[in-house]
Image (cartoon, rainbow, N blue to C red):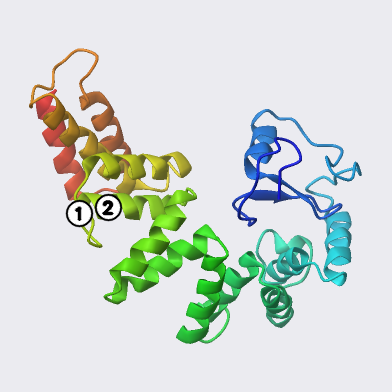
Amino acid sequence: GDCPICLETIKHVNYRTISRLFCCGGFICRQCSDLKIDTKKILIKCPLCRENIPHSYDYEEIRSMVLGHSNKGKAWAQTQIGMWYLGEESGSNFFAFDEEKGLQFLKQAADQRDSDALLEMALAYSEKTLKWDESKYMYYLKEAADLGHPGAQRMLGLAYESSNDEKTRLHYITLAASQGDAVACYTLGAYFMCVECGLTKSLILAKHYSKMSLEEDEEGQPLSAYNFSIALYRLGLNRYEEIMEIPGHSPIPKALFWARKALTVKTNDHVTELISMVENEA
């Protein structure tokens, strides 16, 4: 569907790409939703049905709206209610915790091939709420991944790490990274850095995907910061023939910044060694 605000086409509709409008069940793209938050502009009227949009703390009104959509068989609403019953997304404000009801709603939505519900069912079978079942875990994960869910694509790709199927692993990691999944971007950058999955070593692509990971989740990706710093430093050595003191072009300040950023999140001997090496070039 298309976002009614910016008119951009949303190829894969899931929690990462849209913000749901509970009044009519429509949605706007995540970029427009985030922009409204950043500029402190609040949507008062729905851009689709023109009804008043409830405040986030109007729990009773929101619950009533979502229940109405669920009773009409809307998969997204069934997914939302299922997650509330399982205590996710401030679920305690809407329903008392009930694992059986939560899974029942998620299963109904998954049967309609809702990608968010399919991922939640996969997580349920990973011992989150149900007994571990590898076949069902992989089934639901693949269904969600093939519907374009980036989280499922990344998890499915990582699930193939224990096998020798590098081609499938790389396929799903690349799909997730192309949608901006921070962990997938870090993983793909590391593959290019360390020559995994049959890829040719590329500092440029390692830098590119590490940077993408940091743009999505700067604080939560210390390994991306570390890889980004290494790539900057080594590319600088190659580009300037190991002359690093070129005013305005030296990669040292940026490389040091990201190496120290990685160190503030997680202490690591490799990071400390990198900082020392870069500082010696300064």
From the viewer's perspective, is 210 left or right of 252? right
Q: Residue at x 36, y 69 (%)?
A: 168
Q: Residue at x 20, y 12 (%)?
A: 247
Residue position for label 1:
194
Q: Is residue 263 visible?
A: no
Foreground residue among 97 and 277: 277
Secondary structure state at the residue bearing disc 1: helix
Q: Residue at x 44, y 66 (%)?
A: 155
Task: Name the amino acid, label 1.
Answer: Cys
Image mark count? 2
Disc 1/disc 2 C-alpha distance (Å):
6 Å
Q: What is the quadrant of the C terminus in the image?
A: top left
Q: Is residue 268 visible?
A: yes
Residue 221, image x, y percentages: 38, 48
From the viewer's perspective, is 196 left or right of 136? left
Residue position for label 2:
190
Foreground residue among 130 and 68: 68
Question: Mark 2 and mark 1 in contact (Cβ < 8 Å)?
Answer: yes
Q: Residue at x 56, y 68 (%)?
A: 144
